[in-house]
Image: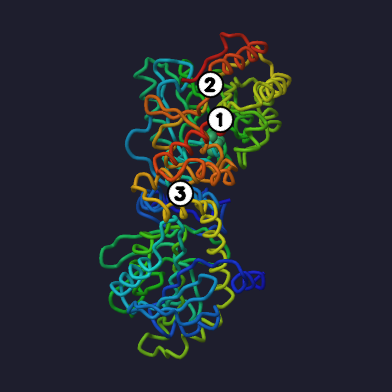
Amino acid sequence: MFSTIYIEEEVLETSRVKNMLDRFPQVPRVVCERYGEVFNRKSQNFRLQKKAPALILAKKYGSKVLVAPDGYGYNDSRSYYFSHMLNCVYDCRYCFLQGMYSSANYVLFVNYEDFEEAIASKIEKNSGGGVYYSGYDCDSLALEPVSDFCKHFVPLFGEYPNAELEFRTKSTQIRHLLEQPVIPNCVIAMSFTSHEAGSRWEHKVPSIDKRLEALQKLQLAGWRVALRFEPLILDSQGLTPYESLFAQVFAKLDARKIHSVSSGLFRMPIDFHKRIVKLYPDEELFARPTTTADGMIALKSEDESLQLAAIEKLLFSHISPQQYYRCA
Amino acid sequence: MIKKFEKSLHGSESTPVNIVVAHALEAKALIPMLHLQPFQTTSRFVQYGNSNNLHLIVSGIGRAAMEAAITDLSQQQANEEGQIRAWLNIGIAGHSKAPLGSAWLGNKITCQVSGVSAYPPQLIAGIDSVAVITVDEPERTYPEDVAYEMEAFSFFEQATKYSTAELVQVFKIISDNLENPIEKLDFKNIPIWIRLLQEQIILLISKMSEIVREHNDSHRIPGVYRELCSRIHLTVNQKLQLKRLCLRYKALGLEADLESVISLAGSHSKQIISQLSAQIDRVGKQ
Ligand code: SF4
């Protein structure tokens, strides 16, 4: 699963790290002082590291709960994100993480108690409320069997019923969620693209069927689930891929009980795009004509807004407009 | 398994790897093993190569010698095409208890003088790894459970200026330990140990080659680019634009169209670039 495990000296003797290491007796271990010595150094190559990623166990210093970027979620105010992990076990070609980091190794911050404290204090500053996203710099659930992340963080939100926790994921690692009591203020938001986009650009991601199966189990167990249809990469096939995707999704889930549904077009900071182009000069997606606005890059498309409206219309045949929001 | 790698090493596939050794005795066993021939150059460093693009340079002992050899070789190999090479340092090291002739990949290299560490990413499975400390004087007491040697840190630091860290590796062969101190090192053993490690060395070179080949393939610029650069005057900026356009045509599966667009555009650099841009914007839109 990992080519090497790097461990910061400071967390080497913690019981959480020892338990994690016990699970991988065969994987070579290297002790480092700070994770920055290994992660995101210049002259590293994200694409090559994806061939055999390493795990880095580290302690997070500094701010742990940050204001969510504009348009990240459905709630315009009091939205935050926290990242117990950097990078993702999947390999989606459109993923902005490739442009954000020069390293594809997974950094797992193991000082959960410090995160907990920071989250609790932020919730209290927000009079017990706010929306807290996990899964901005990683996939929230994909490393759950190793990290026990939701096992640890869901109960915290149980104590703050007016604060909402949203996991962004494409993972089917839901066992820990199913094993614990449901809390109504936790949302598991699963991302989907069309079958065609998935098979072209989403490597190592569980199939749509498997992801839907996981969502269905969660929904039946009483968890609130959400759907994120992004990034939408519009092409000559028009609406057909989305018709079949939506039909498949809503045949499996109880649409009325879905917390929220969103869609968003492919967008990326210009700098990230530049770096990704250098990594993947052979990738058709990044050779397409683009447009830029406000520091972001998008694929050039003449009838983008018409197509997006048509996709939304399709969605509204399954859900109510109140359940929907469009990502900026 | 090793047969397959050996075949790829001696077959027609390119092996864009630079091997750097400090000592001529380390080169001695590698030359026949890797089918290398003396490489004629004006460089002050002794070099060997083969038709598959495998290269070996003898740097001399110590950090400064290593740095100079890498700079020299990378200048000799400089290209505008973005093609890179892997770098592999093969050399002897001391360890408190590791048996003589055993060998490891370096997973952490610390410069004893500065205390700074570097971490070669470990992409290659199947070869054990160890931490390495680069010292300026031979280490006789081996206080830590690491391999002690004299060049790895400079090698890594310098070679990563010309390649990516994943493709810069050090392979250390134990030549001395507490029971067999360095003063008693019989230099004749060095080529023997290296010969005995043939399987691991070939595996390492083959796997590194595979990764470089894949990288260079994906970054290969269509030949039209070089042709145009030699035919017409292009500013530095225009070269960059042209390079990117050629790569986009290739990525979109339109490499074959490049020549016809260029021939229609005439011989003016600005016109060629704007024609290529206009055309790709038309066809590239999905
Ligand atoms: S699942 Fe999300 S975070 Fe992971 S690679 Fe894909 S887009 Fe990136």
Label 2 element class: loop
Residue type at mark 2?
Glu
Is B171 located above or below residue A75 in the figure?
below
Q: Which mark is residue B285?
A: 1
- Quarter of the view holding residue A170: top right
Q: CA distance from mark 2 to mark 1?
A: 9 Å
Q: Which amino acid type is marked by label 3? A: Ile
**Dots 2, 1 in contact, CB < 8 A:** yes
Q: CA distance from mark 3 to mark 2?
A: 44 Å
From the viewer's perspective, is B50 left or right of A66? right
Residue A176, how many percent across, how many down? 60, 34
Residue B276 in the image: above or below residue B129 = above
Q: Are marks 3 and 2 on the same chain?
A: yes
Q: Chain of mark 3?
A: A
Instruction: State the image coordinates of residue B109 (x, y, percent, origin top left).
Output: 38, 64
Residue at the spot of label 2: A302
Q: Secondary structure at mark 1?
A: loop
Q: Quadrant of ligand 1?
A: top right
Q: Is residue A280 visible?
A: no
Residue at mark 3? A56
Residue type for callout 1: Lys
The image position of residue A202, as x and y in percent, is 60, 38
Residue A275 appears in the rendering: yes
